[in-house]
Each structure stands twice: as C-alpha cells, then as structure tokens.
Image: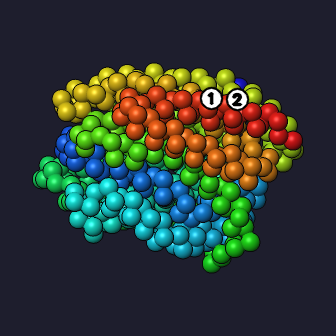
Amino acid sequence: MLSKNQTYQFFASLGPACGALGVQLVAFAVTARGLGASAFGAYSVILATCAICGELVGVGSADLLVRAVARDPSRLGRYFGNMIGMIALTFAPMTAIAYCVVQSQHAETISPWLILIAIVGEIGVVRISTSVELIMVAHHHVLRASTVRFFTPVARLVAALVYFHMSSRLDGWAIAVFIQSALISTVLLVITIVLYGRPRAALLTDELGQGLAFAVPQLSRAIQSNFDRVALASFVTPGALGAYSAGSRVLQLGLFPLQVMTRILYPHFFIEGAKGVAAARSFALGKLPLMTGVGTAAMVAVAAAGELAPMILGKSYAASNHTALVLSLALPLMAIQYLAGDVLSGSGHQRLRATVHFVMALVSSMILAAGAALAGVQGVLIAFVASQGLVALVMWGVVLRAE
C-alpha cells in the first residue's frame, strides 16, 4: 500500500499526467491526420530512432543526480552541472547515429538537413524535459514534475495546431518541431535554475561508469518500446507503418500512469536499498499488486482509446485499433518490469541491471526483427508482447536470486 503522502502525490500527479495524456493524444491526432498515414509512417521512424538514441545522451547523469540528491539535497549544484556537461558532450554523437539510421530508411523521402533538424529537436526536448523532471523528483516534488510533463505536450499541441492549419508538408513540420523544442527546452532550464539554483561547473568522470550503468537499462527499455517501428520500416509500406505507428503511439500514452507511480517510488528504492537488496526486494513485492493494478487499468484505457483512433484519424488508419488492442496487453508486464529493475538500482546492483537489460534488449530486437520478417505487422505484434513477458520473467528471476 501507499503511505498517505504517497497516495496524495499519486493522485495529485495523476491529474497533470492525465491532462498530459489527453493533450498528447490530441497533438498526436492532429499530427497524424495532418501528415497522412504515409508521411506519418516516415516521421514515426524519426521518433522511434530518437527515442532510442536519446537515452544515451547524458549517459545516465540525471539518474546519478536523483541518487545523490535524494540522499543529500546539498549536492544538487555539482550533479546538475555534471548533467549539463554530459548532455553537451554526448548530444552530437548520438544525433549523428540517429541521423545515419533515419537517412538509411528515408534517403529519398526527406531532405538530409530536415532529417537532422527534426532529430535535434526531438532528442533535445525529450532529454531536457526528462532531466528537469528528474531534478524535481529527486526533491520529491512529483507534482511539479507532472506539471512539466503536462506543459511539454501542450507546447507541441500548439505547434501542431498552428502548423497544420497552414500546411501538411513533412519538411515544414520538421522545422516547426525544431523551433518549438528549442523554445521549450530553454524555458524549462530557466525555470529549473530559478527554483533550485544554478548548476556548478563539474564533470564527474569518475562516475561515468555508474552513469552508463543507469543509461543502459533506459536504452534497453527504449529499444524494447520503439525498435518495432524501425524493424517494420523495411518490410511494410509507409501507409501500413503509419497505421501501426498510430496504434503504437496510443500505447505510449498508456505508459504515463506507470511512470507517475514509478517516479513516486523511485527515490524510496535507494532509501530501502541502503539496507540491502532484501529490503528493496521486500519493498517491491509490497508494491507489486499496486503496480499490476495500475498497469491493468492502463491496458484497458489504451484498448478503449485504440477503438477511437480510426474514427479520429481517418480511414487510412483503420488497422490502428487492432494494433493498440494487442500492444496494450504488454502494459501490466512492463509495470512489473519497472519494479524489478528499481530493486537492483536501489540496492547497488545497477551494473547487474544494466547487463540484464542490455542482453534482453538484444534478444527482444531479434524477436521483433524475426516477427517483422516472417509476418509483417502481425508478427511484430505477437513478438512485442512475448518479448515484454520474457523480460519481466527474467528480471524478476534475477531479483529473487540477488544477494
């Protein structure tokens, strides 16, 4: 069960989170309808690739900040500075990798420089907004973090409404994304400095390995959640990919309640983990029914939202409801994965978590690629749910045996 304060945090945060869900759904609908299934399919590869490559931007420095500040708030300035420095150092290399992946898929669809600015915009705003949220989470200001989560998609919705009222071209949308992302990232950084103080110049190279150990599980999770669209791009038409991506996007909205709950509990795993892995494991087992319930509620919501997608987006997205329905089955499995992983993080077994996640990400990628090659969309749907179940099983097997 949750404590009274945690219950308040969850429901207080759920309001902005649900609002963010609604805003993201509307922004997604405006974008998908404005671009059309084929162009949206092409843009979905950019989104998926950015989601994967963006996880290595900063090399886990935001999670290092959470761990340090949750235990001693006076350490914020140094870890804030390290986070900014690590983001600056890793942004260009990961952008280049994302560019090469997308360019190989869409060399004739989108001009190279527009691919580049879209990638810069997408990676930049996600990394800055996520980092700002984690600074707030480290101070147990979960409601503030949820407000940031609400504010970011509102800005994207405004950009979409303005742009698609004037045009429906994919290249113009890439420019709009870049401008909107730059503005929002700047605003969020300024707000964070006003609320919590300036970062201090620091580059904690001695903690790079620990940061990487935090980043690899996030990278692995991003691969498991986004590689399906990258794999499908080589085996289906852009229109079919667009319909699949629409259903997949509905699933992404279902992750918000899980992330709200995870961020409430996340600092507590470090507190319990200081007593040993048994204490962290006991804490997680106590929260298992709660997380399973939240995952099941999210599953029902995603399945229901998927039924509405074709009516909102148009006939070219007719297959998206079936996609959302099948993919929603993975949400309870993903919920229990998060708990298992946080046991390892909180108890000082982050490198073990990173290793398990990385291996399972590779296995999941192979399963998804095989599904795409053998049966297209239907094969990927089955492979996605099966791979999430496999990850949950392996993660909890490791946690129950950890000492």
Dot 2 and dot 1 residues touching (CB under 8 Å):
yes
The residue tagged 1 is 291
Q: Is residue 192 above or below residue 155?
A: below
Q: Is residue 13 visible?
A: no
Instruction: Report helix, strand or loop for mark 2.
Output: helix
Of residues 109 and 170, the one drawn nearer to the viewer in this rendering: 109
* Residue found at x 82% / y 36%: 401
Residue 63 at x, y = what percent?
Answer: 64, 56
Work out whether residue 288 or residue 144 is closer to the camera in this orientation and state it.
288
The structure residue drawn at horizontal position 56% and vertical position 33%, both measured from the top left corner, is 388
Residue 139 percent location from the top left of the image: 65, 53
Q: Residue at x 58, y 42 (%)?
A: 363
Image quarter hosting the N terminus: top right
> Which residue is at the far left?
166
Percent position of residue 345, x then y: 73, 48
Looking at numbered disc 2 in the image, what kind of residue is underneath it?
Lys
CA neighbours of label 1 inside 10 A, class few (<14), some (14 to 19), many (20+): many
The residue that label 2 is drawn on is 287
Let me know if residue 400 appears in the view: yes
Q: Which mark is residue 167?
A: none
313 left or right, relative to 249: left
Residue 371 position within the rendered picture, expressed as x and y whole percent measured from the top left: 44, 35
